[in-house]
Image: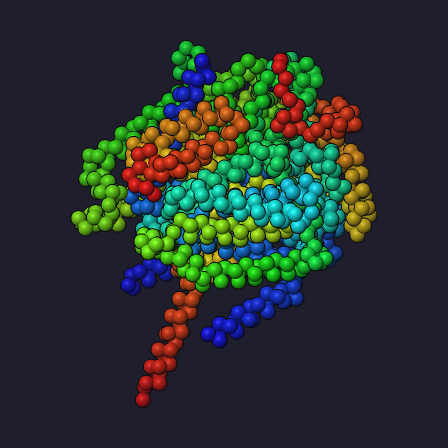
Amino acid sequence: MSARIIAYAITLVALIAVPYWISGDYYINVASQILFYAIFALGLNILVGYAGLVSLGHAGLLGITAYAAGYTLQAGFGHTTAILVALVLGVAAMAIYAVLSLRATGIGFIMITLALGEIIWGLAYRWISITGGDNGINLHGRPEPFGISLDSPSAFYYATLVVFLVALAAVAVFVRSPLGAALMGTRDQPRRMNALGYHVWAIRFWACLLSGLLTAISAVLFVYYTQFISPQALDLTASAEVLLMVISGGAGTLLGPIVGACLVVVVKSVVSGYIERWNMLLGAIFVAIVILMPEGLVPGTMRLWRLAWRKAERRSGKAEAKP
Amino acid sequence: MSRKMTRRKFMAATAAGAAAASFKFPAPAIAQAAPFKLGLLTVKTGPLAQGGIQMEQGVLTWLKEHNNTMAGRKVEFFSADTGGKPAGTKTKAQELIERDKVDVIVGPLAAFELLAISDYIREHQTPTLSLAGADDLTQRKPNPFFLRPSATSSQAMQPMGHYAATEMGKKKAITIDFDFAFGYEQEGGFQAAFEKDGGCVVKKLWAPLGTPDHTPYLAQMTGCDVICQGFAGSGPLAFMKQYANYGLKFPVVTGETGGDDALLHAFGDEAVGMMSCCPYTLDLQTDGNQRFVKAVVKDFNVVPGFYAAGLYVNCDVVEGGLKGAGGTTDNKEKFMAALKAVKLKDSPRGPISFDHLGNVVGNFYVRRCEKMSNAPYGLKLWNKTVKTYENVSQFWTWPEKDFLAHPVYSRDYPPVKAC
Amino acid sequence: MTFWLLLTANSVTFGGLLFLLAAGFSLIFGLMRIPNLTHGSLFMIGAYFGATFAGGMLGTMFNFWVAALMSAVLVALFGAAIERLLLRQLPGQPLAQVLVTLGISFMVADFCLMVWGGDPIAVATPPELVGFVRAGPLVFPLYRIAVIGIAAVVAIALWLLLDRTRLGAMIRAGVDDPEMARVVGIRVSQLFTIVFALGAGLAAFAGVIGGPILSVYPGLDQYMLPLALVVVILGGSGSLVGSIVGSLVIGFIYNFGQALLPELAYFVLFLPMLLVLLLRPQGLFGRFVP
């Protein structure tokens, strides 16, 4: 137990010290991207991993929040108003998503979310008066919490890190809470949960709202990082990408989505500078994960680690047993 | 149990092999002392890769021909694949500017990519030369660090509209294009010029981006005497094929993406008779162009078109600017001013200069696609230049003030009037 | 008048092409409960193979129909390999299935870009089908009518397969109740490989048949996969009649929707899909609620 706490402490220190041991603003920016995509993946994981509901339309929700922030800023309001409007609209959109999608489970849920995502994508192109069509909306400036400017990569990184840690803590608390346990119950045994008197639909709905809140938070960070929003950020490949982050890292675990986000962002942003066929590489990595660790990188690595540990123990035990 | 392990190992090895096979390094980066750093933002994966790959070919051809030297300085070339997504474009722009410290950026490909980094390049004062057509970036929302040696979205379609009304004598046009900004600006330009010269646009059809089958729109093409299309990517090929298949006989006019010479090898008889107005034409018989085309054919075994020529010309302009600034780029404003002052006489697209907003003024060529069984480079079709408009600016024949007074071309502007 | 006739005729053509695309997906999903997200890429690579064989890029120029069959067989083998080596290890693990099928689709798409480049490739209409059919004011390409015929032939062949052969009976049993099918002694895992290969081959065949109409280009997979999904959802999975009806309905919605409601062209397919999912999640003829 204490070994785990030490590991967490070291990771925390490493994260805080990123601008010092990672040389170059560019890589600090990549680190920021990893963090807010991780929040996005954590949000999706609430549904995919803990509720057993796979959504292929989450990029649409990210888009709604981002467009809300962009539009509000463009209309002349300040950053605080924009962020609040964006978060409220994002969660409200998720509530509508949930009401529509929760009419089905399994593949039906996937298809409804896919359809909703595609409809929102189409709206982003066509509702030009609000979204600017594929010219998108440009954002200017970043909020200044407590008067600290977030323009520099390090400053933005720290702001993102703080939000990420809070989000991670919130998810951790949720997972260990009675609601979290109930949610996992509805994932594994929905009929039994129903029989036991749990309101399965309501539990799933609240999980959707939490997922929506995390998605909205990541969308705000995303749009302030990129300073731009356009329909390309909402399309089917974007939804598929975040889903792949969750699954490849390990759905239903706390660290899995973070590892998955790290994998995809690093390949897309860093490795793509060295390897021309990085798309094929990414696909090959996914296939490799399915072959070697179908449950995901995090659970798979822990399983292999435990196997190796046990093998080492057995070998040392055998060595000792020899007279 | 052991059989499963063996199969797993085989699969793992295959996957590792596939991963290893994907190790192919992008363009060569030659490190020199005090080099001039040139960055390229292009798209090499996904549906936009068609133009993006050609863009890189244009730059590589230029570098090879000039021995990797610009104005006496060795060039260090950085090629970045944005993936065609604005977030990726921003990331790669940051990579080029913050990590690789490039002196100038050529690219990106798409208008939405350029809009995503417009503020960023202005902030970092990095001169950027792009093919992206977004009209307003050199009109109502100009970016002082942006230079466009190719054309605005509407710049080629305006002379096309004029030509269709005057030389072709057409009176009623139906336009069709993809339902996004590049489409709106192209058709807006065509309509404005066509109607100025007495024509009338009867209908404006918009196909959702990526539509594979154009029948719903082809079925509406009646009551006109000319069709104007502005598709890009694979669109022109599919559209012309389907157009011919339905036996539609109206002449078709198009812009630089619809008439891209790089597509000549893919077109069949359906393209014969298609008129296009482009900033670049393969059949330009100047030294500058012939040298360029021969080099691309030799290095890459492809016939160049709008994208490759555009980036080659961009490199010419960069060198011209570097010479004009005395070989140093320490003073960004001076370098930018030198770039804007560049005047080329014999670029592959002919003579060019820039207006005060950073957009090109140059020749635009109207060509007819003809069947030619012994065309150069093994082609069976050839775009033959029938008219050259010289000194064409982004405002066509309107005074700049009047042009800028009306809103940017959009889906509803100019509006469709009764004919 | 011509307008309505033309669009009606094309609705049936497009529906026919969609049927060829979606039938394979519906079979795979119906029997194996696997959403085969590689389906769009299989369509695309089948089209590329077909263009290569029929276009003489390998030295010899094959007959268009031979090229289509060759392409279908090649991709069917590829599909069988995917099923045996990868998907077989993942029964009942939908997340891993999604990961592996999407991963393979990335690899296939990039492979196509690597081999055939970024430029679009035209596929010549087979010479015996060039030309039009004239019915009064209506001018309709002969090839598009042929597509209707081809789709009908394939539909009948599939129906005969499912209804009249032992294999078909086993497939239908597997769709209705996989556990009982196993209990009764049906070699379900072998069946899976055959069905996946069949579905993959159908997708590739559809790609080649669609070639003269759509051409082949990067990004084709990303457009065709959602179309297949929409058809299967509307018509219902695991049902041949469902695939036929779904394809026709989507064919009509695609043509008339885009022509008559241009403002809604971006939503014209997904709004009906959403409505069907909300009101009748198993689709019109589905044998089970997915």
Instruction: Indicate how the structure is coloured in the image.
Output: rainbow
Which residue is drawn at the image coordinates 68% and 56% (left, top)? A145
Which residue is drawn at the image coordinates 49% and 26% (left, top)? C258
Q: Is residue C70 above or below residue B398?
A: below
- Number of marks present in the image shown: 0
Q: Is residue C220 above or below residue B31?
A: above
Q: Quadrant of residue B301?
A: top right
- Asked whether residue B31 is in view, the answer is no
Seen from the viewer's position, the closer of residues B51 and B60 is: B51
Residue at the extreme left of the image, as rendered: C184
Q: Quadrant of residue A234?
A: top right
Which residue is drawn at the image coordinates 29% and 61% (left, top)? B3
Residue C150, image x and y in percent? 33, 27
Q: Quadrant of residue C168?
A: top left
Quadrant of image for the N terminus of chain B: bottom left
Which residue is drawn at the image coordinates 40% and 28% (left, top)? C251
Residue C145, image x and y in percent? 37, 22
Quadrant of image for the C terminus of chain B: top right
Instruction: Tell me if C88 is positioned left or right of B100 in this view.
Output: left
Residue C71, image x and y in percent? 37, 38
Residue B225, image x and y in percent? 58, 14
Residue at the extreme bottom of the image, as rendered: A323
- Asked whether residue A183 is in view, the answer is yes
Seen from the viewer's position, the closer of residues C162 and B241 is: C162
Instruction: Tell me if C258 is positioned left or right of B289 in this view.
Output: left
Instruction: Tell me if C166 is positioned left or right of B168 in this view.
Output: left
Residue at the extreme front of the image, as rendered: A197
Q: Is residue A121 above or below residue B67?
A: above
